Image: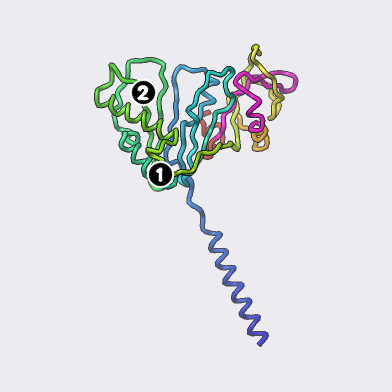
């Protein structure tokens, strides 16, 4: 009798072990960017260009991260962008449909070219499923029309601009999920180092990363050092300079989004 019970226990253990192995061996679907809008180009300082983050990103797991559109006249300005997040799983089809209706998923659509100089491009990347390739649409001076833009092009420029602004602000026209956005805290930061002179608005902080010895186009802080930046976020601003080994430097900080892992992934 004892032998039979022991055999039953061993058999059950083997079955459970097989089930556990099967469960753990099933890989989760790869998370990818479903939709992303960002601003590129234009006549701006290199340091400002480095700190630009996407206007919004929507991932295939439903997470959306958006840059706050609220602007203040405060000077010095913020050192870090204000980022919010919420899950929009049940709104993704509606959002994608709005982008499609605005021609923002059609790389072949002709947007025209306004007769203005040094204005940024609006770039929209979409991937409608894991099996499909991503598409990229870039529109010069999206919010403008006039010479160089037909009536139809002006119509879609206006529509596309409104859609992107509404998505970025979590407008209930497209996002019906009722939960409120929360603050999104980056896990890693990229940084750019340059020399500079302090101004009357400058405050000095001790640098949290590796010792700075020269200017640097791009590097990435460790997760531990990035956490120190997040902790200092209320104490630093656009005029803050950083002390490293007895010398002060200007450091531009750029949060890395979940799909970004290094300097190359942000174009550096």
Which quadrant does the N terminus fall into?
bottom right
Q: In percent of the image, x 65 and y 80: which residue is there?
A: 6
Mark 2 touching mark 1, by CB under 8 A?
no
Outermost residue to the left? 151
**Foreground of the two, 190 or 103:** 103
Residue 121 locus on image (x, y percent): 40, 24
Residue at 34% over, 41% down: 97
The stretch in magenta equals: 229-256
Q: Using the rendered view, name the quadrant where residue 135 is placed.
A: top left
Element under disc 1: helix
Query: Alpha-carbon neighbours of circle 2 within 10 Å: few (<14), some, or many (≥20)?
Result: some
Q: Residue furthest right?
A: 246
Q: Which quadrant of the view contains residue 205?
A: top right
Decide: is 51 above or below 147: below
Instruction: Give the side of residue 46 with respect to residue 160, left or right.
Output: right
Q: Is residue 191 magenta?
A: no
Mark 2 or mark 1, earlier in chain: 1
Q: Residue 63's x, y, as percent? A: 49, 43
Q: Which residue is mark 1?
A: 91
Q: Which mark is residue 143?
A: 2
């Amino acid at each position: 009798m004892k032998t039979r019970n022991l055999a039953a226990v061993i058999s059950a253990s083997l079955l459970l072990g097989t089930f556990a192995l099967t469960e753990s061996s099933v890989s989760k679907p790869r998370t990818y960017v479903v939709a992303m809008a960002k601003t590129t180009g234009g006549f701006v300082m290199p340091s400002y260009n480095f700190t630009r983050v996407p206007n919004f990103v929507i991932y295939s797991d439903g997470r959306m991260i958006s840059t706050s559109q609220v602007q203040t006249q405060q000077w010095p300005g913020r050192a870090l962008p204000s980022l919010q997040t919420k899950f929009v799983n049940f709104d993704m089809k509606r959002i994608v449909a709005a982008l499609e209706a605005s021609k923002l998923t059609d790389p072949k659509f002709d947007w025209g070219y306004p007769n203005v100089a040094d204005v940024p491009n609006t770039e929209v990347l979409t991937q409608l499923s894991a099996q499909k390739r991503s598409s990229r649409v870039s529109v010069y001076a999206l919010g403008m029309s006039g010479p160089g833009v037909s009536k139809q092009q002006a119509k879609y420029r206006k529509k596309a601009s409104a859609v992107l602004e509404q998505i970025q602000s979590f407008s209930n026209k497209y996002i019906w999920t009722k939960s409120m956005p929360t603050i999104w805290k980056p896990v890693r930061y990229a940084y750019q180092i340059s020399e500079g002179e302090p101004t009357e608005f400058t405050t000095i902080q001790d640098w949290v990363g590796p010792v700075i010895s020269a200017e640097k186009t791009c590097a990435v802080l460790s997760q531990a050092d990035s956490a120190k930046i997040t902790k200092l976020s209320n104490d630093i601003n656009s005029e803050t300079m950083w002390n490293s080994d007895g010398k002060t430097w200007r450091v531009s900080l750029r949060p890395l989004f979940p799909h970004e892992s290094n300097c190359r992934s942000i174009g550096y």
